Amino acid sequence: MELDERKVKILKAIVMNYLETGEPVGSRTISKYSDLNLSSATIRNEMADLEEMGYIVQPHTSAGRVPTDAGYRFYVDRLMEEKEEVEEVKGTLLERVDRMELLLKQVAKVLAYNTNYATLVTAPNYKKTVKFIQLSLVDSSNLLAVIVVDGNIIKNQMIRLNVLLDTEDVLKFNILLNTFLQGASLEDINLEMIQEMKKQSGEYADILDHIFQGITEAIHEAQEIDIYTSGATNILKYPELGDIQKTSELLEKFEDKEELTQLIEGTIGEDDSGIQVFIGEETPVQNMKDCSLVTATYQMPEGAKGKIGIIGPKRMDYKKVVNTLKNLTIELDDIFKKGREVTNDE
Amino acid sequence: MELDERKVKILKAIVMNYLETGEPVGSRTISKYSDLNLSSATIRNEMADLEEMGYIVQPHTSAGRVPTDAGYRFYVDRLMEEKEEVEEVKGTLLERVDRMELLLKQVAKVLAYNTNYATLVTAPNYKKTVKFIQLSLVDSSNLLAVIVVDGNIIKNQMIRLNVLLDTEDVLKFNILLNTFLQGASLEDINLEMIQEMKKQSGEYADILDHIFQGITEAIHEAQEIDIYTSGATNILKYPELGDIQKTSELLEKFEDKEELTQLIEGTIGEDDSGIQVFIGEETPVQNMKDCSLVTATYQMPEGAKGKIGIIGPKRMDYKKVVNTLKNLTIELDDIFKKGREVTNDE
DNA sequence: TATTAGCACTCATTCTTTCTGAGTGCTAAT
DNA sequence: ATTAGCACTCAGAAAGAATGAGTGCTAATA
């Protein structure tokens, strides 16, 4: 059977109507509210074909039709024309990037507010490289390590001492650490390097162990993918995800970063730039089979990438979501670029 | 009418039974499962009295009785004997206090896991005093300010420069800042002090403005009440909070720190130490009228106080919750004390 | 006088049954 | 190829009947 132009028109009408109303769409509706000027009977015949082809289904015999995953997919890939009007993202993003965390939290929040879906944002994930390390003696038994990795992400680590150090010792350590570690990534810090540093540090070799532990912890922590979410409760707004049981399980996942990390990593694939749409079964997480997921990848000037995701019901307003995401990533790119110009011209 | 001993016994039986089952309690149940050896008819008479006195109600004519807020209150205040068995808190807390944030997040999580209710924990709120400040030059245009306030809370602030500074300048600033600001709280930093510092800093007075701004921002941020929540979705587990509409509004509040701050501040009252129980209408927030809130105050050796709260349905297991909270606060006090011994013996 | 057995009554809940109407598929006419 | 028309289906609403947990009241009992 062939998917001729008329069938496409009808399919489009069905999907759009369903997106709007959430009710199964009957032949009569299409007959009346489309410019095809066909009787409901004709539409019915066409619908039967479309059903056979797998684009739509009837929830039960005497009901209208509802798009299948394939139907949505066809719509998203081929029918959904771009909106020319820019979907403005309301709510200001921070302009200063020095607190990445705040910025991303804000992104999640603004996005949730704008779309009324659940959102999540991952921090850009790149091989972090030490830019600057400083130890300072806070008091006699506490040594503070401040580590700045690129992207101006700052980590602190309090190191408890059981030996007395004086300022001069600390100064020595600082120099030592910086000469060795500046520009190093986590992988670069290998046994050999450590040995060498220990050798050079002479009598304080055992303290160095302590310090190292603190530092690796900090770098590790910086390396972890941070995830920020917002608007999780929006999920409750869509009654088609009726089963409270299921929905609350989904919400629970949303509280758990581990799970989310998996989710996001599941989306890293072929088309790793731009926008991806996962519909129903295509979604990489079990509990989400009744939802759709739209992700966008943003990129920092250094090449680091992060993801923004929106989770909503299958009948989500794909057009709006895709558009909003596009604009948001542009805005983000902009902010990062600006940030870079001002900051990192080393 | 008088609340004699028998009535009290009956009331207690009703409340306990209701806490367990969630179903209205009938006279026959009490007659059978209590050691009173009274017929259901007698119980009925007594129940009628208790209803008149406002401790219980019937949801409808032919149903058993359910405790009113007053009924719960009486139970909590007078009937609920302390469990002697310690309600063990399962799941380890971090032992090291240097990352307060992690500790409190953990507390919220463990508590939610143990009780199956929604939990929230506020960071201790005290007048923060600067313990240590350090500026360092990360690169030519970025100055990093690290501020440690007591309790070893660390704040970072990247300060962007449009003037070139060399290491010596930074050193000078460091000395200047530390002599003036060490031990100062936010309120202490007044115009006079600033003037004096500017005078002493001579030619770099205008950079100082920049730095000040950064530092006050950081202190402000440290001053803010941080709130950590966990297990919000547990709320969905209690069907008696049936109205999804309402419940989801409640959940939304749980996403919003502002609201939560209000909530917690609403509980700061007379009995500001130990454990407080708010039942239904007593709760300081509108959407929470169908819930109960139990809060505990923990105290750091410095005298700073924070709150731990548990939100659940009115028929929550008060005994368990109160007990768990008691033990948790003790455990926390312990951790803090240890932390102090090792850390802050200045 | 306090307690209890007994009975009529109430009413949420559950299960059935009936009704309704949106929507279909098919056939015969255009 | 399209459409009018009609019989058919079936979810969901509405209405009715059965169930049973629980009550309040009264009269008998200890």
Image: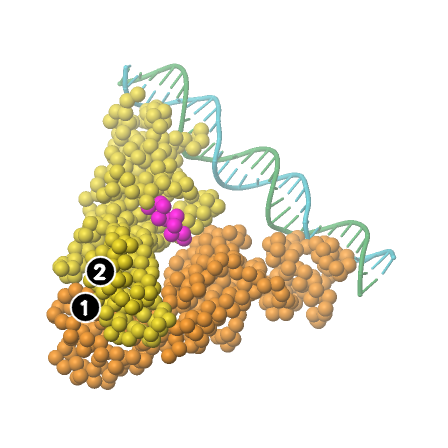
Chain colours: A orange, B yellow, C cyan, D green
Magenta segment boundaries in residue numbering: B255-264
Label 2 chain ID: B
Q: Residues within 10 Å of mark 1 (few under 14, many from 20)?
A: some
Give the camera-side residue of A197 and B3. A197
Residue A16's disc is none
Report whether residue A190 is seen. yes
Type of the residue with mark 2:
Phe
| Quarter of the image where the N terminus of chain B is located | top left
Give the camera-side residue of A71 and B170. B170
Label 1 chain ID: A
Q: Vertical placement of B160 versus B79: above or below?
A: below
Residue A137's disc is 1
Type of the residue with mark 1:
Leu
Q: Percent position (x, y) of residue A201?
A: 17, 81
Q: Main secondary structure of the magenta part?
A: helix
Residue B180's disc is 2
Report whether residue A145 is seen. no
**Quadrant hosting residue B143:** bottom left
Give the camera-side residue of B134 and A249. B134
Q: Vertical placement of B270 versus A276: above or below?
A: above
Residues tagged by mark 1 and mark 2 found on one chain of the structure: no
Q: Percent position (x, y) of residue B84?
A: 19, 44
Question: At x 13% / y 60%, what residue is drawn?
Answer: B346
